[in-house]
Amino acid sequence: MLKDVLDENIYNIITTKFNYGYLNEIRLRVDKPIVVFVKGQAYFLGNNGLVTAEENAIIASKQMVEDVIFRASEFSIYSINEELKRGYIVLKGGERLGICGTLVCEKGDIKTLNNFTSINIRIPHEIKNCSLDAFSFLVDSEGMKNTLIISPPGAGKTTFIRDFVNQLSIRNLSYNVLIIDERGEIAGDNNELSTGKFADVLSFSDKHNGFMQGIRAMNPHIIVTDEIGGEEDIKAVKYAGNCGVKILATIHAGNLEELKAKDGWNDLKSTFERYVVLSKRNGPGTIEGVYNENFSRLAVWR
């Protein structure tokens, strides 16, 4: 939870001086102004809230940055070394702390990250009904379509899939849903974020092991996962599809053209029947279009 890791003054400002429900990110950089993103727009953080003039901004000190990380580790930096090697820590409320500093490597392997210089705190939000406009294109009387959510970073794809799972629950569509929550961002570290009444959550598992173990153990109708990346992720998705399990996944791309240019796309494209493109045009979660397996547009929003 943010209250446990942030400086008390900073926490009070972001929770009392503007609408916290619109907060997307907090960026602390050593000896630089604190920047916050609210509804996708960047502002400086001042003692009275959001400011546009740099001279009125609070400057993040090295101690402030280090204190956030030490508090996140519960004052045992060695206990989070595996997370530091990946470059981020996930808090109990699902907030992700991306961390920059100095990578320490040995024979090509990352040993740790130290000399911390900046933190990006990404704030998860439950935005009810944000997937509703696309829902009827993804689920029909025959069931759910294998669906890929496409968006640049920070455009609301995790929020979209969380709400989609909740929409299944609201409609009493009793599909067994297995969420492979690799970074603890979909459901939160201890499942604090709502995922409805038909979802099981496997947290902090890589996709390969999560898909294999989950299909054998939980008999899911649908697997939900975030941020398909490399070859192992693609293999896991294809394995699930070949087992008759439906997939709802996300991937980083700004548009369909960027998607088609990605490495491994030719191995993945036969899996999906629907594509939802998101952007930040009107704030995170803006739906730009829904497409079928042939990339024909089914719906577009202005």
Image (cartoon, grey):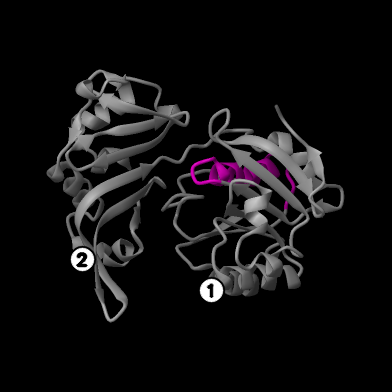
Q: Residue tagged by mark 1? A: 209
Which amino acid, mark 2?
Tyr
Image quadrant occupied by the N terminus: top left
- Residue 2 location, quadrant: top left
Q: Which residues are magenta?
A: 152-174
* Residue 98 image offset from top left, x and y in percent: 34, 51
Q: Residue at x 23, y 25 (%)?
A: 57
- Residue 7 location, quadrant: top left
Q: Is 87 positioned to the left or the right of 133 in the image?
A: left
Q: Residue tagged by mark 2? A: 78
Q: Residue furthest bottom?
A: 107
Residue situated in front as seen by the camera: 301 or 123: 301
Q: Residue at x 47, y 28 (%)?
A: 39
Image quadrant occupied by the C terminus: top right
- At numbered mark 2, what does the secondary structure look like: helix, strand or loop? helix
Whether residue 168 is situated above or below residue 280 in the rendered picture: below
Query: In the rendering, which numbered label is found on residue 150?
Result: none
- At numbered mark 1, what does the secondary structure look like: helix, strand or loop? helix
Reply yes or no: does residue 161 show up in magenta: yes
* Residue 58 image offset from top left, x and y in percent: 20, 28
Reply yes or no: does residue 269 show up in magenta: no
**Along the polypeptide, which appears first: circle 1 or circle 2?**
2
